[in-house]
Image: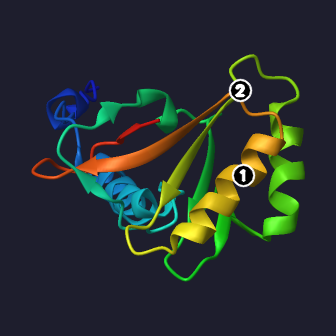
Amino acid sequence: MGIAVRDEGHKVNSNINVTPMVDVMLVLLIIFMVITPMLTNKVQIDLAKVNNPIAMPDADKDDAIVVAVTRDGKLFLGQNLISASELGQQVADRLQNKTDKTVYVRADARAQFKDVEDAIDDVRTAGVDQVGLLTQKVEGENVMTGGE
């Protein structure tokens, strides 16, 4: 009578197979590369360039109220296209629960001055304490700066 000896212990592979993990990581990388440009929620505007701007880091916050005036006179509140008649009311609605009543205006460098002035007037009549005009430094990169 013989004893059957099983020799399975020598067949065990203790190496970690990283191929599935690399596949998943590459898929995630591709997804993030495609989605990241879509996350910028700003209207494309060529800001006025100045030499000595005042930094306004609060304009980049998620709850900041930003009004954009394009070169063809269109108004945007955040990312939404809005008419001039609705601007004051919608800004007032957004300011109801806020203690900081500052609105930032991003105006295209080639926008008509009257369009920018009308937007600021509408914002002021809505009860805004301060209006920040966002500009860009001449020799720097796209830094959100501006002055009052």
Which residue type carries mark 2?
Lys
User: Is label 2 in a helix, a strand or a loop?
Assistant: loop
Q: Could you tell me which quadrant the N terminus lies in?
A: top left
Residue 129 position within the rendered picture, expressed as x and y whole percent measured from the top left? 70, 27
Residue at left 38%, top 40%? Answer: 146
**Residue 141 visible somewhere in the drawing:** yes
Q: CA distance from mark 1 to mark 2?
A: 15 Å
Q: Is residue 146 left or right of residue 49?
A: right
Which residue, given by chain and number where applicable, does mark 2 sit on?
101
**Which residue, as the protein is rendered here, is positioned at the far top?**
99
Residue 23 position within the rendered picture, expressed as x and y whole percent measured from the top left? 31, 57
Residue at left 90%, top 50%? Answer: 89
Residue at left 44%, top 69%? Answer: 44
Query: Which numbered dot is residue 90?
Result: none
Examine the image and state in which quarter residue 127 appears. top right
Which residue, given by chain and number where applicable, does mark 1 sit on?
121
Residue 102 position within the rendered picture, expressed as x and y whole percent measured from the top left? 64, 30
